[in-house]
Image (cartoon, grey):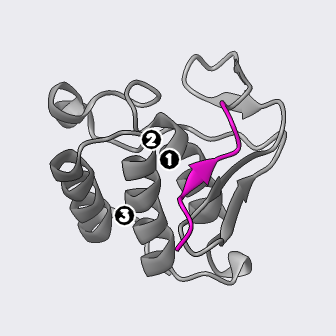
């Protein structure tokens, strides 16, 4: 089995709304099965959709090791059915991308369970 990896560090610019970013170039996560999950230049991810009360436990959007995982997760949550991937596959990718980014296994599992319960479904 291959090792999961990101294509590098995401290149972004903050948008005037003070909350979102725009990708300046493509950013990819490749999972251990060799499946590529690509966010494209000009996509505007909003970071992990973590409820404000959980920020002290998990971290705020774009802060923490989960940041890179959230960029590709956001892309596929926007695409939904058009991506050809189910919400279960997309949320599991987020968990694996979190682990790849260095998020501890317990924290990654908590974040994955939160997305499984409260995240988008299609």
Q: Determine contact: label 2, label 1, CB under 8 Å.
A: yes
Q: Residue furthest front?
A: 1
Q: Determine contact: label 3, label 1, CB under 8 Å.
A: no
Up the image or down, 13 lies above or below 120; here it is above
Up the image or down, 85 lies above or below 14; here it is below
Residue 8 is covered by the magenta coloring: yes
Q: For mark 2, does the 10 Å Cα neighbourhood hold few (<14), some (14 to 19), or many (20 or more) residues?
A: some
Q: What whole-number distance in Å separates the C-alpha atoms at marks 3 and 1? A: 15 Å
Residue depicted at 76% across the width and 44% down the height: 43
**Which residue position holds label 1?**
69
Bounds of the magenta segment: 1-9
First-in-chain label (2 vs 1) = 1
First-in-chain label (2 vs 3) = 2
Circle 2 or circle 3, nearest the eye: 2
Q: For mark 1, does the 10 Å Cα neighbourhood hold few (<14), some (14 to 19), or many (20 or more) residues?
A: many
**Which residue position holds label 3?**
119
Give the x, y percent position of residue 65. 40, 33
Residue depicted at 42% across the width and 60% down the height: 96
Q: Which mark is residue 106?
A: none
């Amino acid at each position: 089995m291959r090792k999961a990896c990101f294509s590098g560090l995401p290149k972004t610019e903050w948008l005037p709304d003070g909350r979102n970013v725009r990708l300046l170039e493509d950013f990819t996560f490749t999972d251990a099965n060799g499946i590529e999950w690509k966010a494209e230049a000009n996509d505007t991810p909003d970071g992990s959709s973590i409820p404000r009360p959980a920020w002290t436990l998990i971290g705020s959007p774009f802060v923490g090791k989960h940041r890179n995982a959230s960029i590709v997760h956001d892309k596929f949550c926007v695409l939904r059915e058009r991506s050809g991937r189910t919400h279960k596959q997309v949320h599991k990718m987020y968990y694996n991308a979190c682990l790849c980014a260095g998020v501890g296994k317990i924290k990654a599992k908590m974040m994955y369970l939160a997305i499984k319960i409260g995240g988008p479904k299609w």
